[in-house]
Image (cartoon, helix red, strand yellow):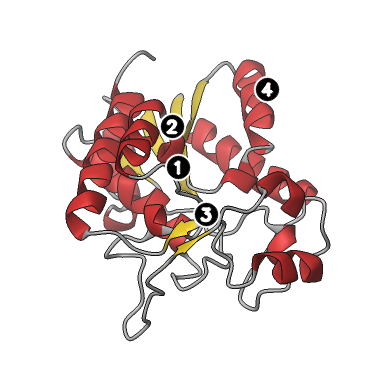
Amino acid sequence: MRITEMNWSQVEEYLRHDDRCVLPIGSTEQHSFLSLSTDSILAERVSIEAAESISVAVFPVVAYGLTPYFMAYPGTITLSETTYFALLIDILNSLVQHGFKRIAIVNGHGGNSPAQAMCDRFAIERNVRIKWHNWWNAPRTWAKVQSIDPVASHASWMENFPWTRLMNVAMPNLQKPMIDPAHVKTLSPIEARNYLGDGNYGGLYQRSDEEMLAVWQIGVEETRAVIDESW
C-alpha cells in the first residue's frame, strides 16, 4: 500500500486496524555507471514489493542521506548529520502523531547508519517500536550475494538491477580490484575520487539478470519478514 496512492481518509481508515508502516531511506550519490538514485530506488522498491502482499503502508523514500565522501562526484547530495537526524526525527514525530506505532525503516545506504542509534532512542522515548533494516546486507540476502560472487561492493554488480542501470550506458567487462572502504572515510572528497576512480569499490560491474532476480527475491522476502513478524 503506497501512501502516494492513498488520500488522508484512506490512511485514517487504515490506522483503525493497523499501526505499522514502512519508511524507506536512501541516498543520492555516485554509483559508478549506475543511477545516482540507486540506493533510493532499491530501498523504496524492496519496501513496496515486500509490503504489498501483507497490505502495510509504505511512505515515499527519503532520497537524501549522509555521503560527504562522494562530494567530488557531480550529482551527489549530502546532508549534515544534524540536518539528517532532525529530518528523520520530524518524520517520525509526524508518523507517531498520526498513530503509527510500529515503524520499519528500510535503509538502502550504509552511510545512513549513524542514524540508527538515534532512531532507537526515539523509539524508547516515544514508546513505539522501530526496526532498522539494512536490506542489502541482511543475513539471507548477503549470503545469497556471497554465494554468487564474494567480490561484491558499492556500485558493483550487486547493485546492478534492471531498475538501477541506465539506458545507453555500457558496463566495463572486467572485475575491478577491491579497495579499502575504511580508507575512503579518511580521505577528502577529491582524494576519495582519485582513489576510487569511477566509483566502483570492487568487483564485476554486471552479472546476469537471473542471478540478480534471485538476490532480489530473497531481499523482498527478508524485508517482508521484518515488516510482518516479531514486533
Asked which secondary structure carries label 4, the reply is helix
**Quadrant of image for the C terminus:** top left
* Residue position for label 2: 104
Q: Are marks 3 and 4 in contact (CB under 8 Å)?
A: no
Q: Residue at x 62, y 23 (%)?
A: 120
> Observer-nearest residue: 88 or 200?
200
> Observer-nearest residue: 223 or 209?
209
Q: Is residue 9 visible?
A: no
Task: Kindly report the distance in space between the C-alpha atoms of the residues bearing marks 1 and 4.
Answer: 17 Å
**Residue 139: where, in percent of width, then height?**
40, 26
Q: Earlier in the sequence, mark 3 or mark 2?
A: 2
* Residue position for label 4: 121
Q: In the drawing, does residue 83 fall left or right of residue 219? A: right
Q: Please, what is the three-letter code of the amino acid marked with disc 4?
A: Arg
Q: Are marks 1 and 2 in contact (CB under 8 Å)?
A: yes
* Residue position for label 3: 154
Q: Earlier in the sequence, mark 3 or mark 4?
A: 4
Q: Residue at x 74, y 64 (%)?
A: 192
Residue 5: quadrant of the picture:
bottom left
